[in-house]
Image (cartoon, helix red, strand yellow):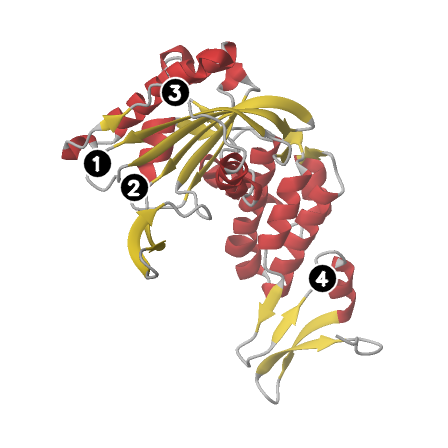
C-alpha cells in the first residue's frame, strides 16, 4: 500500500535524450533544476498522479549474474547513499537511457530525475527516486498583444495531464533489487522502458503471489469447472475462492481446496491443472503464503459474476453472499421447450 500525497521533491534534474540510432543528440543540464513555488506542485502532480491511480504491480531490478552488474541499480544505490550528489548521478542515468534508445520507434524527450522524500509504502515512510520521461508534444495557442491587436501563435509543449513513462524506486528491499512501480502510456516501444532501460522483473511478494494464485483459480474455473459443470458453478467456485482469500491472512492450499472445491471429483483435476500450468503463474511450489488484501480487492473487481444467456437475459450473483446463489438459484431442463432454465426464488423485488 502506498501513499504519495505527502511526498516532497527534494531535488530535480532535467535532461533531454534523443534517439541514438537516428543520430539525435543528448543534452545534459549542468546543474539541477531550481525549485519554483508555482511549477513544483504542478510537476509533483504530473509525476505522481499516474502511480496513485495505478494498481500496485511491483517490480525489482534483476540481473542474470548479480545485481552489482546492473548499471541502473548501481546508479540508484549511489543516489540513495549520497542524495546531495543526485544531479551528477542523474546525468549518468540520462546517458544510460540514451544508450538504450536505439530502436527506430523510440521518441526523443525530456528526462526528469527526482529525489523524493516522504513517500509511504507498507506503512513506512521512505525516500525514493523518480525517473520520468515526456515524449509526445501537443500543439497549443499562445496569445500576444501588439498595437491593440491580439495575435495567436501556435506552439508545442508537454501536456501535464499525461506522463508518458515513469518509474518510482522506493528505498526498501535493496538486497532484492528495490521495490519499483512503473508506468508506460505508449505501447509502440513496450520492451524499451521495462526491459532495456529499467531491467526489472516482477517483485515476488505477497501481492504478487495472491494475484497470481487467484488468476490461476480463474483460469481453472473457466477451463475445468465450466466444462465439467456449468456457468453457475464456475461463478460460485470463483466466489468461494475470493471469499476464502478475503477472510484469511495466510493462504494454506489444503484448507483452500477443502473449503472451495465442492465437487470431490474436481480435486485431482485441480492438482493436475496446477502441476501442468504452474510455471505460467510462477506458483510451482507455492502452497502457503501471506495474503495481500489489496490484491484480493483488485481481483474481486475484475472477476465477472454474471451468467449471460442466449435469450438476452443476464443473471448477476453477489460475490459477498455466495450462499444466496446456492440456495435460491436452480438450474433445470424443460422437456416441452427443449431448453435449459434457471429458477430463481425471492420474497420481493428490491427497489433500485
Q: Nearer the viewer, residue 74 or 265?
A: 74
Establish if 86 lies above or below 158.
Answer: above
Q: Are marks 4 and 3 in contact (CB under 8 Å)?
A: no
The residue to which callout 3 is attached is 90
- CA separation in Å, label 2 and label 3: 23 Å
Query: Residue 48: horizontal and vertical position, in percent?
Result: 53, 38
Report how many numbered discs are placed on residues in the image: 4
The residue carrying mark 1 is 103
Task: Tell me where residue 26 appears, x and y as whole percent.
Answer: 24, 27
* Nearest to N terminus: mark 4 or mark 2: 2
Marks 2 and 1, Cα distance to the nearest angstrom?
A: 8 Å
Mark 4 vs mark 2, CA separation in Å:
41 Å
Residue 189's label in the rendered image is 2
Residue sticking out furthest to the right: 347
Assess disc 3: are there few (<14), some (14-19) or many (≥20) residues with their C-alpha within 10 Å of its C-alpha: many
Q: Quadrant of residue 89?
A: top left
Quarter-of-image position of residue 253:
top right
172 sits left or right of 160 in the view: right
Residue bearing the label numbered 4: 318
Residue 137 in view: no
Using the image, determine if residue 88 lies above or below residue 333: above
SS assignment at label 4: loop
Amino acid at each position: 500500500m502506498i501513499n504519495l500525497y505527502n511526498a516532497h521533491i527534494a531535488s530535480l534534474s532535467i535532461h533531454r535524450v534523443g534517439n541514438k540510432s537516428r543520430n539525435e543528440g543528448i543534452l545534459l543540464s549542468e546543474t539541477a533544476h531550481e525549485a519554483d513555488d508555482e511549477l513544483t506542485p504542478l510537476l509533483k502532480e504530473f509525476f505522481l498522479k499516474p502511480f496513485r491511480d495505478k494498481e500496485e504491480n511491483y517490480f525489482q531490478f534483476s540481473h542474470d549474474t548479480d545485481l552489482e552488474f546492473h548499471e541502473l541499480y548501481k546508479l540508484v544505490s549511489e543516489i540513495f547513499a549520497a542524495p546531495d550528489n543526485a544531479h551528477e548521478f542523474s546525468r549518468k542515468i540520462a546517458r544510460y537511457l540514451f544508450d538504450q534508445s536505439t530502436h527506430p520507434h523510440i521518441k526523443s524527450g525530456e528526462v526528469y530525475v527526482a529525489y523524493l522524500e516522504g513517500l509511504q509504502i507498507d506503512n513506512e515512510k521512505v525516500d525514493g527516486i523518480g525517473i520520468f520521461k515526456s515524449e509526445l508534444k501537443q500543439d497549443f495557442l499562445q496569445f500576444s498583444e501588439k498595437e491593440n491587436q491580439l495575435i495567436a501563435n501556435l506552439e508545442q509543449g508537454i501536456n501535464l495531464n499525461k506522463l508518458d513513462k515513469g518509474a518510482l524506486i522506493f528505498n526498501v528491499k535493496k538486497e532484492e533489487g528495490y521495490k519499483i512501480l512503473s508506468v508506460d502510456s505508449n505501447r509502440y516501444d513496450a520492451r524499451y522502458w521495462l526491459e532495456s532501460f529499467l531491467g526489472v522483473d516482477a517483485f515476488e511478494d505477497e501481492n504478487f503471489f495472491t494475484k497470481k494464485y487467484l488468476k490461476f483459480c480463474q483460469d481453472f474455473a473457466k477451463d475445468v469447472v465450466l466444462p465439467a459443470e456449468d456457468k453457475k458453478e464456475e461463478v460460485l467456485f470463483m466466489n468461494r475462492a475470493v471469499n476464502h482469500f478475503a477472510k484469511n491472512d495466510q493462504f494454506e492450499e489444503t484448507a483452500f481446496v477443502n473449503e472451495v472445491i465442492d465437487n470431490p471429483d474436481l480435486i485431482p483435476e485441480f492438482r493436475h491443472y496446477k502441476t501442468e500450468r504452474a510455471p505460467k503463474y510462477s506458483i510451482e511450489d507455492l502452497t502457503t503464503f501471506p495474503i495481500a488484501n489489496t490484491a484480493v480487492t483488485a481481483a474481486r473487481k475484475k472477476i465477472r459474476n454474471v451468467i449471460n444467456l442466449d435469450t438476452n437475459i443476464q443473471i448477476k450473483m453477489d460475490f459477498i453472499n455466495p450462499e444466496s446463489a446456492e440456495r435460491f438459484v436452480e438450474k433445470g431442463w424443460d422437456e416441452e421447450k427443449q431448453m435449459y432454465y434457471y429458477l430463481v426464488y425471492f420474497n420481493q423485488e428490491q427497489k433500485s
